[in-house]
Image (tube, grey):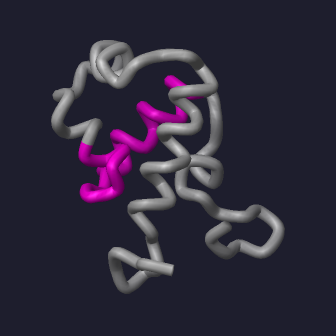
């Protein structure tokens, strides 16, 4: 598994989760960025797994996709590990 920092956060996993959530909601990246009032480049790099996000962005995404942080971060609730 490729990890992007010392805490074991895998940006690629997060990006894939966001893409899955976006596709499930049947919206484009542009629709997401317009709803969240962020730049397209900023969001696209998060979804590509090459950029992390702030806690504020995490909360915006949780609200927009109506989900929890564990889902976005790719964390298993039972084991506490990355899935």
19 or 73: nearer the viewer: 19
**Residue 79 shown left or right of residue 28 in the figure:** right
- Percent across and percent down for residue 1 are 51, 80
Where residue 37 sits, quadrant-wise, is top left
Magenta segment, prevailing SS (helix, strand or loop): helix
**Residue 14 shown left or right of residue 45 in the figure:** right
**Residue 52 shown left or right of residue 71 in the figure:** left
Tell me, yes or no, whether the highlighted magenta stretch contains residue 56: yes
- Percent across and percent down for residue 41 are 16, 36
**Residue 70 shown left or right of residue 11 in the figure:** right
Tell me, yes or no, whether the highlighted magenta stretch contains residue 58: yes
Q: Is residue 13 above or below residue 42?
A: below
* Number of callouts: 0
At 34% from the left edge and 56% from the top edge, which residue is drawn?
49
Where residue 56 sits, quadrant-wise, is top left
Q: Is residue 18 above or below residue 22?
A: below
At 53% from the left edge and 35% from the top edge, which residue is drawn?
62
At 42% from the left edge and 31% from the top edge, which residue is drawn?
60
- Percent across and percent down for residue 50 are 26, 58
- Percent across and percent down for residue 70 are 63, 54
Range drawn in magenta = 45-65
């Amino acid at each position: 598994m490729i990890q992007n920092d010392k805490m074991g956060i895998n940006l690629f996993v997060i990006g894939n989760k966001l893409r899955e959530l976006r596709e499930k909601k049947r919206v484009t990246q542009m629709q997401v960025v317009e709803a969240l009032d962020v730049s397209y480049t900023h969001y696209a790099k998060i979804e590509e797994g090459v950029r992390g996000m702030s806690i504020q962005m995490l909360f915006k995404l949780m609200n927009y996709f109506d989900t929890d942080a564990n889902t976005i971060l790719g964390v298993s609730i039972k084991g506490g590990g990355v899935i």
